[in-house]
Image (tube, coloured by chain):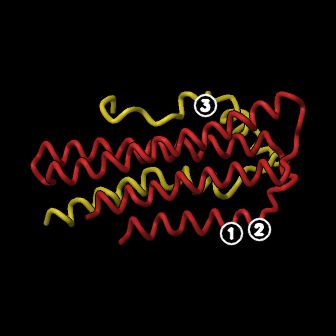
Chain colours: A yellow, B red
Amino acid sequence: MGLAFIISQIVLLAVKNGPKLIEAFRGLDPNSPKDKAKIEEWFDKSVEDLRIRDWNDV
Amino acid sequence: MISKLFVSVALIGLVSGCANRQLIGRDIKSTIAESKMLAFGIKSTVEDIARLTKDLQAAGKITEETANTVKAVYEKAQKAQNVFLDSVKALETLHATGVKKLSFKEVFDNKAALLLVLTELQELYQSIAK
């Protein structure tokens, strides 16, 4: 029962975060008008905001 | 099992992506943007797992030992993510100097660091699924 619950939670996390990862793996095309805005948006993000926080701060 | 499958698919995507997309000569700006998207996805996943672990421990559904195992891998993933982000910063510096295309060295450094993060993430999934 406990294991089933844990696995279901992990699947939920994969479903929640998976699309972002898959999109990044697909790659962004600098010549595509659709991807251009996304490139600008993500290029401008600060690297410091993407660091994983300390365990106690989560 | 399902989480292992998910991470395996991600790794296959990475390897085939490197092989098929001919990263050498690619636009640095879009590579930086992709790397940041990946880093965001990894950060969200890893931090969600930490919250989940804490909730499960508080509810008495996992032992302190299991939680500590997850914490140890979490900290490894955190360090690996920092290595990856430092390589992204190096790409930003390179881009600021006017370089527009990736050379073999940048491709290798960037993807090797990413592989390190994904390996830690896979360990993290496995720890929590135990």
Give the labeled residue for mark 1. B16
In front of the other: B66 or B7 = B66
Specify few, some or many for label 1: CA neighbours under 10 Å numbering under 14, 14-19, or 20 or more: few
Q: Is residue B13 left or right of residue A39?
A: left
Which numbered circle lies on residue B20? 2
Amino acid at the residue labelled 2 = Asn
Position in image of residue B105 (x %, y %): 80, 50
Give the labeled residue for mark 3. A47
* Quadrant hosting residue B66: bottom left
* Quadrant hosting residue B21: bottom right
Asked whether the beta carbons under mark 2 and mark 3 sit within 8 Å of each other, the answer is no
Q: Is residue B32 left or right of residue A1?
A: right
Amino acid at the residue labelled 1 = Ser
Position in image of residue B17 (x %, y %): 70, 64
Position in image of residue B44 (x %, y %): 44, 42
In front of the other: A5 or B79 = B79
Specify few, some or many for label 2: CA neighbours under 10 Å numbering under 14, 14-19, or 20 or more: few
Which chain is disc 1 placed on?
A: B
Q: Residue at x 29, y 41 (%)?
A: B51
Secondary structure beneath dot 1 equals helix
Q: Quadrant of the C terminus of chain B?
A: bottom left
A15 up-or-down from B31: above or below: below
B42 up-or-down from A7: above or below: above
Asked whether the beta carbons under mark 2 and mark 1 sit within 8 Å of each other, the answer is yes
